[in-house]
Image (spheres, grey):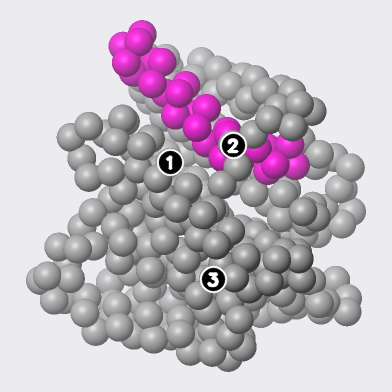
Amino acid sequence: MKRDPVTDVFRGLAVVLMIFVSALYLLSHDVPFPMLHNQGNDFLFFDLVAPMFQFVLGMSLFFIVQNKLPLVGRDGVTWDVLRRCFVLFLLGFVLDSVSYLDAMPWGVLQSLGLSGVIVFLISSRSNLEKILFSAFILLAYSLLYYNPLFSSLISMPHGGPIGAISYSIISILGFMSAEVMHKRRSDKGFLEFLVKTALSLLVLGAIVGLFIPYSKIHVSPSFTLAASGLVMILFSVIFLLHKYLGNYLGFLKEFGRTALTMWVLQYIFGWIFLFVLHKKQFLDFTSGLLVSVGVVILMYFIALALNKLNIRISP
């Protein structure tokens, strides 16, 4: 299947950020607050990683449909996408079950799997219908937000299945962005689409936030809109960098092509320290920072070797 290089670079950036911040948090005991993630409802830079994966999921689904539909038809594409989403969900369930034995195993991979199904189900609809569907999700979430039963459902990690439905809006925007990028007449026009859409989402998120509390934990509508805008701005930066400095971003492509493999390896890395060595946050910040950079470099060479051998975990 033909791969889109910009999508690979953006996915690779998300992988690098994930590996780095996970290693830093695992190894260091005095990490400065701005370099942490998952700190309640504080939206820090590294908290963009999950929305980045949601956005690139939508983009990847577009290219899967685009490349495979002429070859295997709609039924073939449907089964392929459902299989991929099921693998993401199952793998996430297994990894989180091992890592968090006393908690409900719901993580980013499970959200990606469910979001992927939702995006694919409306993938053949017009962009207007996709926008209306997204608006319906936001409206329904907003109306139910203060319901006690609904509040209990979204109290799971990453908002649980309900949070994944809200997250799917970011993936829908990724699907639509990939379509615009694929059909673009000029790079300038595509960048204008990204920036204008991103700014509109940020303004809309601020307005919605006046009525529905901003909540990263519950993936509230205001958070979803703000995260979508920020991710689209970041993608526009990567698009520009790839256009002018593409030759220098090859290392990110290596990560992007082995994203799921890298995801599993960073879990194994954590298990070694937590369950084998019984060590956690035992380094000062500077030492932890250097080791975390070293972990990223090590993972790069592993990704490079796996790509050369064509060995990877693929959904």
Residue 261 part of the magenta-drawn span: yes
Percent of width and height locating residue 99: 31, 31
- Is disc 3 surrounded by few (<14), some (14 to 19) or many (20+) residues within 10 Å? many
Q: CA distance from mark 1 to mark 3?
A: 20 Å
In which image quadrant can residue 52 be found? bottom right
In the picture, the disc for residue 272 is none
Instruction: Answer above or below: position of 10 versus 178.
Output: above
- At mark 1, the secondary structure is helix
Residue at left offset 68%, top offset 51%: 10
Residue at left offset 65%, top offset 20%: 298
Give the amino acid type for the residue marked by disc 3 in the picture: Phe
Percent of width and height locating residue 134: 46, 81
In which image quadrant can residue 235 be found? bottom right
Asked if labels 2 and 1 touch by Cβ distance under 8 angstroms, the answer is: yes
Residue beneath disc 1? 91
The rendered magenta stretch, by its main secondary structure, is classed as helix
- Can the viewer see residue 44 in this picture? no
Asked if labels 2 and 3 touch by Cβ distance under 8 angstroms, the answer is: no
Start and end of the magenta stretch? 253-279
Nearest the viewer among 71 and 259 is: 71
- Can the viewer see residue 115 in this picture? yes
Nearest the viewer among 231 and 263 is: 263
Asked if labels 3 and 1 touch by Cβ distance under 8 angstroms, the answer is: no
Give the amino acid type for the residue marked by disc 1 in the picture: Leu
Residue at left offset 36%, top offset 37%: 94
Q: Earlier in the sequence, mark 1 or mark 2?
A: 1
Q: CA distance from mark 1 to mark 2?
A: 10 Å
Q: Earlier in the sequence, mark 3 or mark 2?
A: 3
In the picture, the disc for residue 120 is 3
Residue beneath disc 2? 313
In which image quadrant can residue 208 be found? bottom left
